[in-house]
Image (cartoon, rainbow, N blue to C red):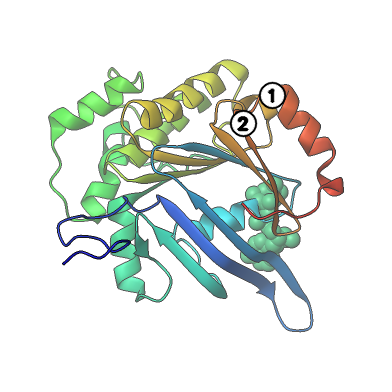
């Protein structure tokens, strides 16, 4: 007998959210001089969405991304990526999960200068002990416009090209969620647009979930929604953001009463 309100055995139920944070807190420093970087952040992001995270310098954006991506551990609270809880497991389990399911793009690219473009791109596969399909690597680098640069080294590339290698590297494992911390922060307008196009395609074409920290209202307007942080807390959300609306919200962040999302 199937009772109302219970699931049938063969019904897998709703797909898990791409990201769920519950009351996540993180402080730095000692008891004497402690800084609360995240102060009880609770949020959920659906799969296949593009979210921007904004807020003043020091509001906890990078800390949020690092904790959500399993690069750092919160002091308390729960982080779930694609239905799997990151908090609580061992370091080895966490590293394995991160290498398989999560991509990360940094503001300063973080490429290894001694490796070629192709070698940098496949690094996550090698670290995960996965097979490297050369054809696939060429495809990914062609998709980011670097099909003719496979043998180049980072110092032979422009900033925009380096960031596109970093995006190829983040995409190569076909992760569920891609975190990007100010990926356009060091780029000119045109290179920034190329990077944003790639991130948006990862969502629209490949159904991945992207979470991007940015200070730029124009970059944020590429996202489906914007989450605002202030003093380590969520301070609002804006759906279908325009650059003007984002700038307006940022200017008045201090006035907004902290709201759950
Ligand atoms: N490793 C650390 N040790 C000590 N304090 C830290 C550390 N990392 C971050 N903090 C502090 O935590 C708070 C949040 O920092 P975080 O880097 O998350 O801010 P942010 O919003 O990313 O800022 P920005 O826009 O400048 O990058 C800040 O007060 C910062 O000084
Ligand atoms: Mg930061």
Task: Identify the residue at image location x=48%, y=39%.
Answer: 109
Q: Above or below — where is 200 with respect to 172?
A: above
Task: Give 6 or 96, whichever is nearer the viewer.
Answer: 6
Looking at the rendered structure, which numbered label has been put on residue 243?
Answer: 1
For ligand 1, tell me if the residue under mark 1 lies within 8 Å.
no
Point out residue 235 in the picture as x, y percentages from the top left corner.
Answer: 72, 50
- The answer to whether marks 1 and 2 mark residues whose Cβ atoms lie closer than 8 Å is yes
Tell me what residue is drawn at x 62 percent, y 61 percent: 41
Q: Is residue 6 above or below residue 102?
A: below
Secondary structure beneath dot 1 equals helix
- Mark carried by residue 220: 2
Residue 234 horizontal side relative to residue 63, left or right: right
Q: Position of residue 35 (x, y in %)?
A: 74, 70
Residue 133 locus on image (x, y percent) = 13, 36
Look at the image and tell me whether residue 251 can be seen: yes
Is 116 or 108 nearer to us in this picture? 108
Find numbered disc 2 in the image and state the secondary structure of the residue it sits on.
helix
């Amino acid at each position: 007998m199937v009772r109302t309100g219970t699931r049938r055995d063969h019904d897998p139920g709703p797909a898990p959210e791409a990201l769920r944070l519950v009351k996540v807190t993180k402080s730095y420093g000692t008891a004497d001089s402690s800084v609360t970087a995240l102060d009880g952040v609770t949020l959920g992001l659906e799969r296949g969405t593009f979210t921007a995270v904004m807020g003043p310098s020091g509001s906890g954006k990078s800390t949020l991304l690092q904790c959500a991506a399993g690069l750092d551990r919160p002091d308390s609270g729960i982080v779930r990526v694609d239905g799997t809880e990151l908090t609580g497991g061992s370091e080895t389990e966490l590293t394995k999960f991160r290498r398989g399911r999560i991509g990360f793009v940094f503001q300063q690219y973080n490429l290894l200068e001694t490796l070629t473009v192709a070698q940098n791109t496949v690094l996550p596969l090698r670290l995960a002990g996965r097979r490297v399909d050369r054809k696939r690597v060429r495809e990914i680098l062609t998709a980011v416009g670097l099909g003719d640069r496979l043998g180049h080294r980072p110092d032979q590339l422009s900033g925009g090209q380096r960031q596109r290698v970093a995006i190829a590297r983040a995409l190569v494992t076909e992760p569920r969620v891609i975190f990007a911390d100010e990926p356009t922060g060091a780029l000119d307008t045109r290179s920034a647009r190329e990077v944003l196009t790639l991130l948006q395609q990862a969502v629209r074409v490949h159904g991945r979930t992207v979470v991007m920290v940015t200070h730029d209202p124009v970059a944020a307007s590429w996202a489906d929604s914007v989450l605002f942080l202030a003093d380590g807390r969520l301070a609002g959300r804006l759906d279908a953001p325009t650059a003007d609306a984002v700038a307006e919200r940022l200017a008045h962040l201090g006035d907004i009463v902290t709201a759950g999302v």
